[in-house]
Amino acid sequence: MRVLVTGGAGFIGSHLAGRLLQDGHEVRILDNFSTGRRSNLRSLADEVEIVEGDIQSAERAYAAVRGCEVVFHQAALPSVPRSIQDPLTSNASNVTGLLNVMLAARDAGVRRVMYASSSSVYGANPALPKSEDMTPMPISPYAVGKLAGEGYCRAFGEVYGLQTVAIRYFNVFGPRQDPRSQYAAVIPNFITALLRGEQPTIYGDGEQSRDFTYVENVVEGNVLAMDAPDVAGKVYNVACGERVTLNELFAELRDLLGGEDPPIYAAARPGDVRHSLADVSAARRDLGYEPGVLLREGLSRTIEHLREELAARAGLEHA
Ligand code: NAD
């Protein structure tokens, strides 16, 4: 079947596009390459159809969804600090852009939209583990936007009959996550620093915890949601179901990579939640989801990738 991956040049979107191609689907990507990279598509470039453009453009969105049975909506500006610095720009991509894609999907007769939501919607709600029936309490503009997207998903099911499945990703990591971005996620940040013999920075006391999820697990959750029965209009956590503190993560990485130096501790960042751990029992029950790659294995694969990327970059600089 023909499928659309918005944000397909990004970290998660490019892994998803690769998996969908492997499964025999015709894959189209809509991306404006704002945070996504052409190099993410290097291994897929001849096989995917690329529509370059912004999801805020109705013309681009309609062109991209035409003929697609399923849409995986991954495009967004995926950073809490960025949304605090510039909430209007985040909102434009993450909410207005989503609405545009949903309208195009509705009008093109798309069967189902999978929406990349986020664990950040739980925000200040202190209960652990996070289950989908808890009251969301977003504490950053990014999380507000992601929750608004879930609201649109539900509403489009109710009023237009468009099937949607919102998937709340928990701190995804893996190869191709951009370590150079000013807003880089913690794992590529720590690994890159340790590979360079530098001390990574931990914001806060390092006792905050996360349910880090290897990217392949998130891809699996999406693929399962595409055809699962009786899931339209619902929301699912997709994660590992285990949590580690940033201090434990640092120790694990130092164990894998070597090194003696402690991390540098800096002031905690506003908008960051304290603890995060998913209850994945609903995804297990309804989607048949199982986190196949656990933390240590995922870290080893990510280290391998970043080592190669750094070596390739160093080679280019010396060429
Ligand atoms: P990413 O930045 O690598 O990918 C996002 C992609 O969307 C990029 O290719 C970017 O160029 C594209 N994009 C952004 N704005 C666009 C626009 N206006 N028009 C067209 N394309 C646009 O980020 P990612 O980590 O792969 O995130 C993918 C999705 O997963 C996002 O929706 C994000 O909010 C969500 N998510 C990610 C995480 C995580 O830990 N990485 C956690 C929860 C949710």
Image: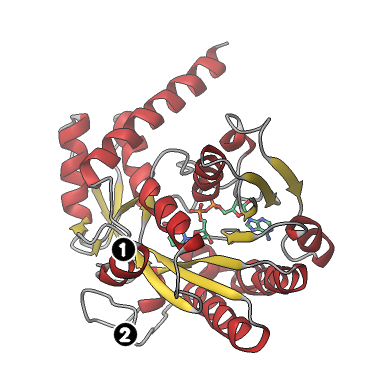
Specify the label residue 267 is tagged with.
Answer: 1
Q: Which residue is mark 2?
A: 134
Q: Is residue 277 above or below residue 13?
A: below
Residue 237 figure quarter? bottom left
Q: Position of residue 138 (x, y in %)?
A: 42, 80
Residue closest to the eye, 276 or 102:
102
For image coordinates 63% across by 77% down, the residue present is 162
Disc 2 crowd rating (10 Å Cα; few below 14, some 14-19, many 20+) is few
Mark 1 and ligand 1: say if the CB distance to the nearest ligand atom is below 8 Å: no
Q: Is residue 64 above or below residue 126?
A: above
Q: Position of residue 244 (x, y in %)?
A: 19, 57
Residue 175 figure quarter? top left
Among numbered discs 1 and 2, the one appearing first in the sequence: 2
Dot 2 lies on which element? loop
Name the front one of labels 1 and 2: 2
Specify the label residue 117 is tagged with.
Answer: none
